[in-house]
Amino acid sequence: MTLQEIITHVSGTVVAGDPTIYPTIDCAFASDLMSDVLTITTDKRIMLITGLANLQTIRTCEMSDIKIILFARGKKATEEMIELAEEDDMVLIETPHSLYKVSGILYNAGLLPVY
Amino acid sequence: MNFKFEVEGGDFTNAGTASSQVKKMMKQLGVDAAIIKRTVVALYEAEVNIVAHAYRGDIFVDIDESGIYIKLVDEGPGIPDIDQAMIKGYSTASPKVREMGFGAGMGLPNIKANTDVLNVFSEVGKGTTVEISNLFQKE
């Protein structure tokens, strides 16, 4: 699925990064628990869907080679988070929808889970 | 090459800074991407453990052509039962740590899963030392 399609499906707003760098996403993982995110082992291009908006969300994705984060339920990325994300060429997207709703929308649209 | 990083307990703003630096260094050295990911995931888990549980700590990193050898030495309460701490799901993390997305009792098991060598030594009331190594070329 293209990143632009994802942004349209979830009524998303890009708040950091250039979404054209990553034209497609292979699969997604939804979690507020960063310990779970750190256990993912895949070479695929992943998007993290989360309601946890803090600096450690960005750090966790940096270590896990995840370049796209979708913040659900209206959570906002802070200036510090945006700065850190842009250092690692990440794309941050915000959506007002809940984690469950965006996961359902994207799954229905064909975006695969990591497992 | 040898590097040293200092980590402050409770400082979640800077947690992960050392791991980020190590990731950049390994990339510059042209280390295989899969080994970089395993190493920095393990190191980040261990670095967050210092921030979450200790008063302070030092991270010593040694990289040569054979692999990366990391020692994390903290001053803190120590771990009374290391075997118990290695069990998935066991955690003594504070509510603040859990708010940051950690403290699910998955750190040490995930460090073990991402390293070729893991050694944990601890003395209650003094601190914990964690040694992690990943070899660049498997025998």
Image: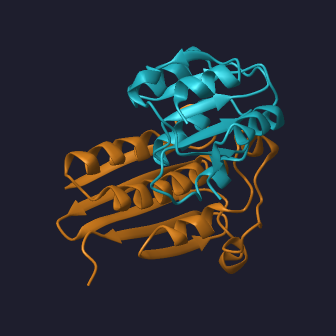
Chain colours: A cyan, B orange
Residue A56 screen position, x and y as percent: 59, 37
Task: Reply above or below: A76 against A38.
Answer: above
Pinpoint residue B115: horizontal percent, then vertical percent.
Answer: 44, 70
Q: Which residue ends up furthest to the front in the rendered image?
A: A109
In the rendered image, the quadrant that contains the C terminus of chain B is bottom left
Residue reaching furthest to the bottom: B139
The reply to whether residue B12 is visible in this rendering is no
- From the top left corner, tell me how far across and down residue B126 is, in percent: 60, 63
**Residue A28 visible to an observer of this rendering:** yes
Kindly identify the residue that appears in the image at 43 percent across and 68 percent down: B132
Above or below for B139 versus B23: below
- Seen at 66% across and 74% down, the residue is B86
Judged left or right of residue B1, residue B93 is: right
Q: Quadrant of residue A20?
A: top left
Left or right: where does residue A88 sit relative to residue B113? left
Quarter occupied by the N terminus of chain B = bottom left
